[in-house]
Amino acid sequence: MQTVSRLKLLREAVDDLRASGTIALVPTMGALHEGHLTLMREAKRHAAHVVASIFVNPTQFGPNEDLDAYPRQLAQDQAKLEAEGVALLWAPDVAAMYPDGFATSISVSGVSEGLCGASRPGHFDGVATVVCKLFNQVRPDVALFGEKDWQQLAVIRRMAADLDLTLPCVEKIIGVPTVREEDGLAMSSRNAYLSPGQRASAARLNQAMREAISRIEGGADVAATLGWLESELGAAGFAPVDYVTLADAASLRELSATPTAPARLLVAARMGKTRLIDNMHVDGRAA
Ligand code: PAF
């Protein structure tokens, strides 16, 4: 696997790869876990070559967020990607991604405004801008993202469609189901911040979400079920709970009644200093 950190070298390496087949891009911020490696494996099913990127993107972190603490472990990540057969790693530094004078930001309205957009102002502008740059830098045939960040995926799809990035640059944006620990906790690089006690309590997030989903799918009152879920999370030690929302799976519009189309239960809550997010499918019932 070749690692490059300059745009000129990336373009040359991508041109070489493209000469012998299609390219799948998997953007990441590193600290790779099984969830990321699943994305790499899935990427291989969609293209001849996999290009991964590792860039801890400062513009998607708020002033009081964990930019400095975010785990950086390039050598370990390189070994993992190599073992997965990734062809090329794009690992720019901040100056290579945002050279002096950089002044452009992409803001996707609507789908980026609620949920994490409400509690992390500016976050999705940072995500949309860096992902648009990554698409233009690598010009992949397909790009893969984890469904754990459901709203991020919706924002990226909206941005790609609105800016006509779908063809010829990114033909397909593929969402890959969340990979979970044995007790159901969604894998995340931020799980490493949890103390052993917090890690044990964090498992309740997914368990309580599954219980809430079976109640909603069984016809229980949506507001009462979301209220129950929020108090379960409080009892498990989550504080504050940023949001507990049932939303239409595609538009992310909030739902207050039993869904009649595929929906998503989405939660963000803090365990100690660690902000965890999760989301799961909810079946819609015939109206
Ligand atoms: O999901 C992530 O790791 C990041 O938000 C992404 C998509 C790599 C953009 O920085």
Image: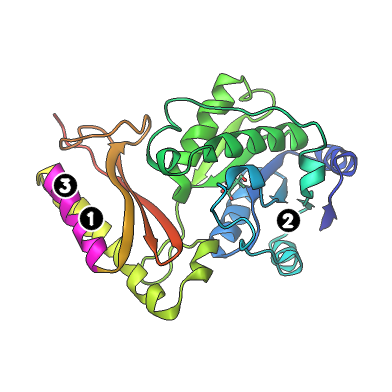
Q: Is residue 25 left or right of residue 116?
A: right
Of the two numbered discs 1 and 2 on the same chain, state the one appearing first in sequence. Answer: 2
Quarter of the picture holding the C terminus: top left
Name which residue lies at 62% across and 40% down. 143
Outermost residue to the bottom: 196
Name the image quarter holding residue 65.
Answer: bottom right
Q: Is residue 226 visible?
A: yes
Name which residue lies at 21% across and 62% down. 232
Name the image quarter holding residue 258.
Answer: top left
Q: Please name which of the two marks, 1 or 3, marks the residue nearer to the observer.
A: 1
Residue 86 got which mark? 2
Residue 72 got which mark? none
Check contact, mark 1 vs mark 3: CB within 8 A.
Answer: no
Residue 224 on the magenta segment? yes
Residue matched to label 3: 216
Front position in the image: 157 or 95: 95
Quarter of the picture holding the N terminus: bottom right
Residue 230 got which mark? 1
What type of secondary structure mainly makes up the magenta span? helix
Name which residue lies at 68% across and 63% down. 72
Of the two numbered discs 2 and 3 on the same chain, state the one appearing first in sequence. Answer: 2
Q: Is residue 120 left or right of residue 54?
A: left
Name which residue lies at 54% across and 53% down. 64
Neighbourhood count class around disc 3 (C-alpha, 10 Å): few under 14, some 14–19, many 20 upward: many
Name the image quarter holding residue 205.
Answer: bottom left
Q: Position of residue 246 (x, y in %)?
A: 26, 41
Neighbourhood count class around disc 2 (C-alpha, 10 Å): few under 14, some 14–19, many 20 upward: many
Of the two numbered discs 1 and 3 on the same chain, state the one appearing first in sequence. Answer: 3
Q: Position of residue 273 (x, y in %)?
A: 45, 64
